[in-house]
Image: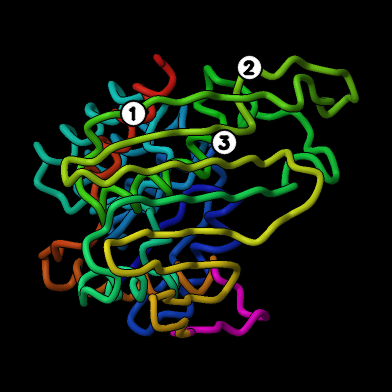
Amino acid sequence: MRVGVIGRGFGARVVAPAFEATEGCEVVDVVSARDMAAVSALCRRSDVDLVSVHSPPFLHVEHVRLAVEARHDVLCDKPFGRNAEEAAEMRAIASDAGVLHFLNFENRYNVLWPLLRRVIADGLIGKPQHVSITIFMSTSRTPIRPYGWMFDAAAGGGWLGAMGSHLIDFTRWTFGEITEIHGQLQRAVVERPDADGKLVPCSAEDGFTLTMRTDEGVTIAMSSSSAAPVNLPVSLLVVGSEGIVEERADQLVVHQPDGDRELFNADSGTNSSFAAQLRYAVVLRDAVHARRVPADVPTFDDGLACAVVMDQVRAS
């Protein structure tokens, strides 16, 4: 599978190397998302099977359209556009053209989430009833991250889209569609220096707290920030009728009335983001070759569903 990558940030740093490391895949070019001439030229190439879009959200519609108009299958990063309206537009563009479309919810392919889903499917904790997720990171605060699109709400920035989209996708994928949602957004750092050192007000959030309920009756509470002073390990708890499964840092533990059982303890030296992207690259290669998207592979449908939820959070 021949891949063209748009984006010299995450696209060049993680996605392109993952495809290059995958047997049967070749990265034909990596272009800057801000260089429209290079993006257009890449999408016009006849030696491309999949265009992988990792541009900022405000450029997603334009780049997806160029890829689809050239009849290429397309992978788009999250957050999927700036809002649900743009997400719906991109899904319609791809569906009408009949190309395969994928959403880069690569965290579905990390080590722990599939194992956690298996614990639930196997009934080890009984019927899931409540989920608690906390992720506190210092990525935008220590050191202070300069102002850019990530801190501009009109450009599609914000921690809700950057991190919350992954968590919302996980809860939909695992516990059913979200039917109720309430949220609060926070700006812990209200202004940031631009490239010239001038302080610019931030309009996008760097933290959020959400409460949700799914159509299967599972309640969910999640809280995350990119502006904590230090990084803390991820904490994810699924409370069932007969036990609790806990993800903390790189461990997965089942707590039951008769005792605790460690199911997995990852190598702390592993780059989990790259490892997940690498597994996803294999799935994408096989789907493109077979011209069929397996049920659990995230698509633009999932991107739109997530965008709808995030719009509801912003409105609330």
Q: In which quarter of the image is residue 201?
A: top right
- Label 2 crowding class (10 Å Cα cut-off): few <14, some 14-19, many 20+? some
Q: Amino acid under label 1?
A: Ile
Decide which of tag 1 and tag 2 comes sooner along the chain. 1
Helix, strand or loop status at disc 3: helix
The magenta region covers 262-272
The relative height of residue 83 versus residue 256 in the rendered view (above or below) is above
Nearer-the-camera pick, 41 or 195? 195
Position in image of residue 294 (x %, y %): 14, 66
Quadrant into which the N terminus falls: bottom left
Helix, strand or loop status at disc 1: strand
| 5 lies left or right of 46 | right
Marks 1/2: CA–CA distance: 22 Å
Position in image of residue 270 (x %, y %): 61, 79
Q: Amino acid under label 2?
A: Ser
Q: Mark 3 highlights which residue?
A: 159
Res. 181 mark: 1
Q: Mark 2 highlights which residue?
A: 203
| 281 lies left or right of 183 | left
Q: Amino acid under label 3?
A: Trp
